[in-house]
């Protein structure tokens, strides 16, 4: 077989020129340097990565190296990295970026990540990969810096948007790319219009096997590769869930997507231990909890949806402060509250005032003292968060608060305080995302979120790569309350704590049952009564059990690389 | 390339370009650029254009490069250089650009009355790149004696053993080439081509197989598309560029060397 060989002849013209003109001639020292440089930048083999050689202080895990290798060798720098949470997608993306930079193929890169992760990406790229990444703070950064990290929400707004659209990027990396599944969104349009040579999409949620999602994501990576949208959807019915039947589509997905599961990595993961601690109300707390039921009896005004009634009940399981805060707000919202309503609220507030002790807080204190190590306490409510901080301080325990609404700098600062100074971090729900706390291995779920996705995120903050100890999870539930029911139904029946949620999603999509999250939103926000909720929950759990049984015989055939 | 090697490389680069070292300690260096080097590296043509027009006094910049952040005090501001950083790539490219062509003489003085003859050699340092969807490079340094046509590989390594000077030494004289440099280059090119075509090209076969598979997949998606042939052609061309196996021979640098008879 013959291969086309080209010989660069431009050099010889100039040599002949210089011979005729007797120079100018280069300097011997530089000439030698040029040869050394060339030997250093040669790519000695078709296979293999250059980057690890130059990153002596970083030891990537085998599956991370494999991913980077795949992307560079087989995917031509256009890929969806869809590893499960906590397997180190940042490292994989960093390796790929570094590799291309070393090969001189990437100079200008744009990295779009959630706002809370901007500084973390910046730090990791700089310290682990020596990539001079800069977090976008001033608008000149877009033009002046080669590697920029920004949040997509900042980037898509003007004046940034216009400046960015003028840039040509060699590589674009997008974290949390599952938000781009819908092609009708502003974010999608923005990313689509970026001028880019290589592109990495990072997502922890597997592509849900929906044909339209595949089309949209692949079109971001390789515009035009799938033919026209209409023809594509004609062939593969738009809403068809299963791409597994079509060999071509499956082949395509394997060409652009890599997904590692925890169990594929061959890494010994530390274990999760889950302990549920049933807690008894004091008499006063019980009275408060029961009194909330009173609000239900008045149908004309008071509470508009059964959901907020349940919210109040759940708050009563958390702290009297949380209840009080919500009641205040309810009163404020009514323009002319009837006297009957005011009376009822006042009656409940009386009960609030009667409560002298928070049983959960007492238990927390006891537990923290026993653990005698760093602990993260998660609560759903701001009021509880504030109360807990005060309460722990009364007992000589240092704690720092954490909320999703904190600015980036404050988050970093709180994380640092927690690592170096404080024993406890008290986080509210929204604080669960975008912060990594591997140095801690105890979580107290002071109250439970009704969405298990959130729970997985909470645990994911500490149960990830870099965690060296077994992870301990303590769940608090007050006996004979709505909380108790949720815990029993949801978390214990389907073993949610031990399982990774992605797994459940995989199971359900395979059987065309929809998403776990959708089901739960339906159960908890649309049920009219606790009874209805219970029935729906029962249905849901048996559906999962059924799906699981079916899968047993089926092996792990869902999404992923072959 | 480890950080220490990068540090040494940068020192040699700036020194051979006559830039004064303002400060150089372990972990970083500050250099005063010359006018030429400022134009070469700092990318500010308007400034230089403006100076030329107004006849102002040139004020070339100082450049601080940090090669090891751990060793450097926080108040030292500079660019952090690491393998893969754009600034280092720029300096690499500049090195190659500034030293593309050379003419040197072996530094062996004769004595009055016994003049030393120096024979002309043509040297080409080349990079042979095997390209498909993957890439591999081979470095080859070839020397061709321009009188008897002898060809030597690893020529650059041989040169490194010799004392060389840009000026013809006293009591030495050069012999005129019988082979002209132009045809010398052609001889080297032909030798390289012959060797390459004798090689095993399994890598290219395999690339073609992968190409074919991707093309089939593409065809499948466009099977029922009638109207959109333009984007089909674009995609097809993109696959060609990605997969088509080819070999590129590029010249890193080279030139004419006058060496004594038994030097190599």
Image (cartoon, coloured by chain):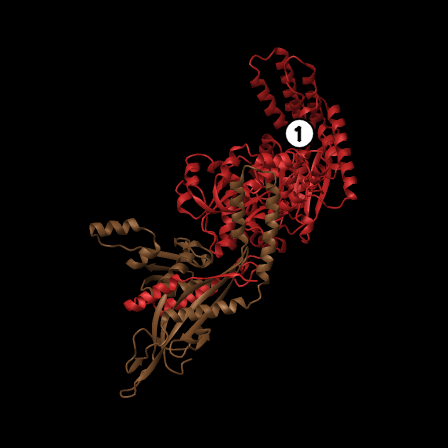
Chain colours: A red, B brown
- Residue shown at 68%/54% (left/top)? A266
Where is residue A207, by image quadrant?
A: top right
The residue marked by circle 1 belongs to what chain? A
Q: Where residue A462 sits: x, y (%)? A: 62, 45
Where is residue B63, by image quadrant?
A: bottom left
Q: Where residue A558 sits: x, y (%)? A: 70, 43
Residue under numbered circle 1:
A521
Residue furthest to the front in view is B226
**Quarter of the figure that contains the C terminus of chain B:** bottom left
Q: Nearer the viewer, residue A201 or B171?
A: B171
User: Is A339 located above or below residue A527 in the figure?
Assistant: above
Lateral position of residue A464 relative to residue A140, left or right: right
User: Is A294 located above or below residue A403 in the figure?
Assistant: above
Q: For the residue carrying disc 1, how many other residues have a C-alpha within 10 Å: few (<14), some (14-19), or many (20+)?
A: few
Lateral position of residue A443 relative to residue A146, left or right: right
Q: Nearer the viewer, residue A171 or A463?
A: A171
- Residue shown at 20%/52% (left/top)? B55
Q: Where residue B172 sits: x, y (%)? A: 30, 81
User: Is B82 located above or below residue A445 in the figure?
Assistant: below
Q: Where residue B4 sits: x, y (%)? A: 45, 64
């Amino acid at each position: 077989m013959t291969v086309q060989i080209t010989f660069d002849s431009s050099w010889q013209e100039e040599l002949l020129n210089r011979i005729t003109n007797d120079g100018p001639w280069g300097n011997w020292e530089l000439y030698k340097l040029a040869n050394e440089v060339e030997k250093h930048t040669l790519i000695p083999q078709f296979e293999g990565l250059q980057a690890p050689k130059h990153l002596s202080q970083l030891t990537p895990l085998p599956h991370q190296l494999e991913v980077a290798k795949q992307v560079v060798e087989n995917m031509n720098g256009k890929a969806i990295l869809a590893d499960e949470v906590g397997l180190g997608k940042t490292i994989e993306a960093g390796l790929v970026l570094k590799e291309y930079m070393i090969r001189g193929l990437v100079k200008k890169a744009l990295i779009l990540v959630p706002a809370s992760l901007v500084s973390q990406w910046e730090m990791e790229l700089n310290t682990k990969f020596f990539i001079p990444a800069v977090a976008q703070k001033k608008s000149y950064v877009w033009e002046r810096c080669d590697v920029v990290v920004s949040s997509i929400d900042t980037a898509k707004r003007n004046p940034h948007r216009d400046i960015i659209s003028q840039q040509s990027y060699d590589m674009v990396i997008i974290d949390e790319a599952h938000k781009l599944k819908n092609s009708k969104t502003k974010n999608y349009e923005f990313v689509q219009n970026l001028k880019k040579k290589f592109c990495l999409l990072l997502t922890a949620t597997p592509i849900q096997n929906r044909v339209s999602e595949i089309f949209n994501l692949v079109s971001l990576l390789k515009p035009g590769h799938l033919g026209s949208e209409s023809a594509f959807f004609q062939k593969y019915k738009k809403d068809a869930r299963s791409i597994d039947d079509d060999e071509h589509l499956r082949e395509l997905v394997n060409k652009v997507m890599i997904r590692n599961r925890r169990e594929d990595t061959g890494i010994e993961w530390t274990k999760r231990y889950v302990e549920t601690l049933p807690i008894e109300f004091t008499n006063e707390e019980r009275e408060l909890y029961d009194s909330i039921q009173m609000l239900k009896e008045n149908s004309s005004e008071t509470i508009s949806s059964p959901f907020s009634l349940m919210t109040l009940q759940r708050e009563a399981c958390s702290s009297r402060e949380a209840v009080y805060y919500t009641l205040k707000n309810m009163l404020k919202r009514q323009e002319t509250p009837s006297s009957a309503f005011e009376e009822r609220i006042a009656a409940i507030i009386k009960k609030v005032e009667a409560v002298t002790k928070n049983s959960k807080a007492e238990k927390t204190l006891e537990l923290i003292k026993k653990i005698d190590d760093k602990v993260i306490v998660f609560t759903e409510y701001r009021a509880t968060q504030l109360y807990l901080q005060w309460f722990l301080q009364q007992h000589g325990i240092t704690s720092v608060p954490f909320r999703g609404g904190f600015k980036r700098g404050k988050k970093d600062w709180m994380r640092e305080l927690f690592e170096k100074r404080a024993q406890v971090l008290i986080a509210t729900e929204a604080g669960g995302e975008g912060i990594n706390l591997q140095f801690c291995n105890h979580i107290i779920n002071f109250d439970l979120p009704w969405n298990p996705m959130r729970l997985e995120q909470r645990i994911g903050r500490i149960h990830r790569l870099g965690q060296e100890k077994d992870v301990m999870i303590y769940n608090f539930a007050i006996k004979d309350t709505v909380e108790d029911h949720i815990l029993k139904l949801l978390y214990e029946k389907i073993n949610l704590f031990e399982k990774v949620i992605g797994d459940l999603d995989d199971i359900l999509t395979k059987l065309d049952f929809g998403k776990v999250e959708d089901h739960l939103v339906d159960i908890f926000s649309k049920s009219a009564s606790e009874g209805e909720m219970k029935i729906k929950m029962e249905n849901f759990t048996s559906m999962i059990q059924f799906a699981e049984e079916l899968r047993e015989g089926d092996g792990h055939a869902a999404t992923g690389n072959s | 390339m480890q950080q220490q090697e990068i540090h040494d490389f940068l020192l040699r680069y700036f020194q051979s370009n006559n830039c004064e070292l303002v400060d150089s300690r372990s972990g970083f260096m500050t250099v005063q650029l010359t006018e030429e080097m400022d134009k070469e590296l700092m990318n500010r043509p308007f400034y230089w254009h403006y100076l030329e027009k107004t006849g102002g006094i040139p004020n070339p910049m100082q450049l601080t490069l940090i090669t090891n952040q751990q060793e450097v005090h926080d108040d030292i501001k500079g660019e952090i250089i690491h393998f893969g950083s754009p600034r280092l790539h720029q300096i690499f490219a500049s090195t190659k650009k500034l030293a593309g062509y050379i003419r040197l003489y072996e530094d062996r003085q004769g004595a009055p009355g016994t003049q030393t003859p120096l024979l002309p050699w043509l040297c080409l340092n080349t990079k042979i790149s095997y390209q498909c969807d993957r890439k591999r490079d081979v470095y080859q340094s070839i020397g061709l004696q321009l009188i008897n046509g002898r060809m030597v590989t690893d020529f650059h390594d041989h040169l490194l053993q010799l004392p060389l000077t840009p000026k013809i030494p006293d009591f030495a004289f050069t012999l005129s080439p019988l082979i002209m440099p132009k045809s010398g280059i052609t001889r080297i090119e032909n030798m390289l081509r012959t060797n390459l075509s004798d090689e095993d090209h399994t890598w290219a076969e395999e690339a073609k197989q992968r190409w074919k598979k991707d093309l089939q997949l593409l065809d499948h998606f466009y099977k029922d598309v009638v109207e959109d042939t333009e984007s089909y052609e674009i995609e097809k061309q993109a696959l060609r560029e990605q997969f088509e196996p080819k070999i590129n021979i590029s010249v890193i640098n080279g030139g004419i060397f006058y060496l004594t008879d038994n030097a190599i």
